[in-house]
Image (cartoon, rainbow, N blue to C red):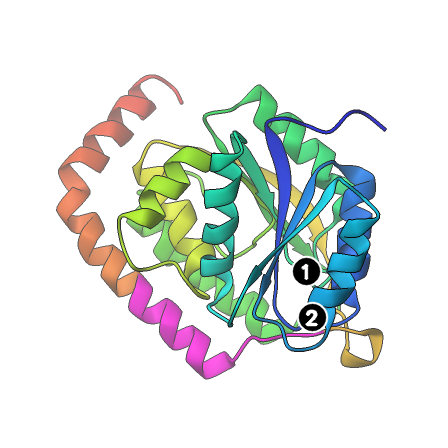
Amino acid sequence: MSAPSATHLVLIPSYNTGGKVLQTVWEARRAWQPVWVVVDGSTDGTLEALQALARDDSNIRVLALAHNQGKGAAILHGLREAHAQGYTHVLAMDADGQHPETHIREFMEASRANPDAQILGVPMFDATAPRERVHARKIVNWWTNLETLWEGIGDSLFGFRVYPVAPLLEIMERQPWMRGYDFDSEAAIRLCWRGIYPINIAVPVRYFRPEEGGVSHFHYLRDNVILFCMHWRLLVESLLRMPFLLGRRLARLWAGR
């Protein structure tokens, strides 16, 4: 195992994910050091279990929010602390075991080679994936491509990614959005607007059934309404940005990029 990275860390937001978070953190820790977990007001006893895990391992750190604030808010909390500690990049991954820890090092190395890019996972679904969610994300990705003029975001919803800390933190501190389920899509879009271009890497994803310890906080109606409202808001903003975005897009096409 190599020495802990001084620039790149794994950041895992967690809310009431049960024993899966312990397995996820341990497997991520085997693949990379350090690993930070932000416990987003969990009430299932996982905060105490994670703190016990961290006491025996200096490469695991647990941050805690007093009450549940949403995925984006948990990541923002981690970004602030990572920036204060001098880290330049974070790999965000979910706590529920869906994301492949075996690809962590590949993503980190891609980020090291391209520090000004965002490294985005593109999910390869198997038979465990709910069909309605697989098809619905195609619509969401179409909106994403429209708002970025097809800059290359392979999947706007998949949360297995490496972000540059400073630009993402600056974006989030300037506005009140991106605190809940809207985080993943809006982060990728706004970073694209900022000139932080995507590099896409395909990875497998697995959905666990409840009897396998799978936990999902996705609410079909509520969260799709959140995404719908977010994309209308971003579409309006993209229209205001259109002269700049179009000019930059044409320049990139002219340069063959």
Please give the residue where the numbered disc 2 appears in the rendered image.
17
Residue 4 left/right relative to 23: left
**Residue 152 placement (x, y as % from top left):** 44, 39
Q: CA distance from mark 1 to mark 2?
A: 7 Å
Q: Is residue 88 left or right of residue 107?
A: left
Residue named by callout 1: 95
Q: Residue 238 location, x and y as percent?
A: 22, 49
Amino acid carrying label 1: it is Ala
Residue 220 belongs to magenta span? yes
Magenta range: 215-230
Name the spot of residue 234 as percent of width and height, x first. 26, 56
Q: Nearer the viewer, residue 186 or 95?
A: 95
In the rendered view, does 55 fall on the left or right side of 44?
Answer: right
Q: Residue at x 39, y 42 (%)?
A: 169
Residue 155 in view, yes or no: no
Of pointers 1 and 2, the one earlier in the residue sequence: 2
Q: Confirm whether the magenta stretch covers residue 79.
A: no
